[in-house]
Image: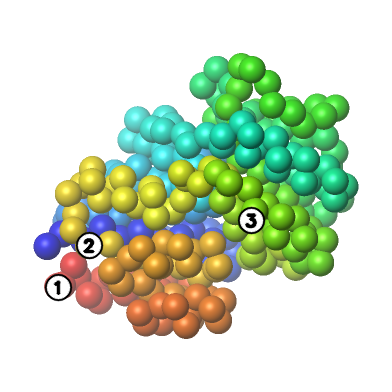
Amino acid sequence: MQTLYISDLDGTLLTPQCTLSDQSARVLNQLMEEGLLFSIATARSASSAIPLLAKLQLRLPMILMNGAVLYDPVKKQVDSVASIAPHAAEKALEIFARHGQHPFFTRLHDGVLEVCFTELKPGRNREYYEERKNAPDKKFCAVTQLELTPLSEPVYFALFGSRNALAPIAQELGGIVGLSHVFYKDTYSDDWLIEAFSCAASKPAGAARLLRQTGAQRLVAFGDNLNDLPLFEASDRCYAVSNAHQDVRRAASAVIGSNAHDAVARFLLENRSIL
């Protein structure tokens, strides 16, 4: 029985310094060469995930932006995009505006992902922009108003902020038919993060597609944060790193080592005889 292994990135496969260690890269490349079915599921887009994984010889599509995008690392191109229904995107824009918040709004235009924004206040939102503004696979666009256009497809909303400021928005987003969202603490700051996307887009949906593509019969997941819980629920086995959120540790089949000590790679290497 073949098994597909899918790991989250930040806080799980990556070190606390936001890097992929040489040890993890070496072990995973060796195991994939031997036939391990392994991929990534992350909230990151290709522009920020690909540079971090340069040492990893991935063969399977990656589940990006919480499942809104599947990316082929071999062909170096987007495999598929799950767009938000226009009525759901309109309602989400109205909610953000009513609360005086200004998210990053990703839309697909002429096959290119463009990230629209109206302002960049100091803090994590500006850092997000600075880290990604020169990415080759998408472009950032400063606009006077966030809106839908006839020639683009809405794909994703993302916004950093305090828990108190974002919690009411997250609650309202949960009432929009056709929209899914995740609300959790950022791995690298004290901010919280809202991400919203099509209900057809999710880490489990991306994993299901990879299961069909590979013919694997079992799914095993690794994670650390609240946005990993849906994938955990869809997995046959799920493992939390020891530094994971307490709710993720409780939901896991078992808790493994820390992301600071190559926990995912070590687990796979030590259990290679049953992979």
Q: Is residue 65 above or below residue 141?
A: below
208 left or right of 45? Answer: left
- Measured as percent of width and height from the top left, residue 87 is found at 63, 34
Disc 2 residue crowd, few under 14, some 14–19, many 20+, Cα 10 Å:
some
| Residue located beneath label 3 in the image | 174
**Which residue is at the front of the view, 174 or 46?**
174
Find numbered disc 3 in the image and state the secondary structure of the residue it sits on.
loop
| Residue located beneath label 2 in the image | 218
**Which of pointers 1 and 3 lies earlier in the amino acid sequence?**
3
Q: CA distance from mark 2 to mark 3?
A: 30 Å
Disc 3 residue crowd, few under 14, some 14–19, many 20+, Cα 10 Å:
some
Circle 2: residue type: Arg
Circle 3: residue type: Gly
Find numbered disc 2 in the image and state the secondary structure of the residue it sits on.
strand
Q: Is residue 109 above or below residue 228?
A: above
Q: Write the residue at 39% across / 55% down.
A: 204
Q: CA distance from mark 1 to mark 3?
A: 43 Å
Q: How is the image coloured?
A: rainbow
Quarter holding the C terminus is: bottom left
- Measured as percent of width and height from the top left, residue 184 is found at 64, 65
Per the rendering, the mark at residue 273 is 1
Q: CA distance from mark 1 to mark 2?
A: 16 Å
107 left or right of 235? Answer: right
**Which of pointers 1 and 2 lies earlier in the amino acid sequence?**
2
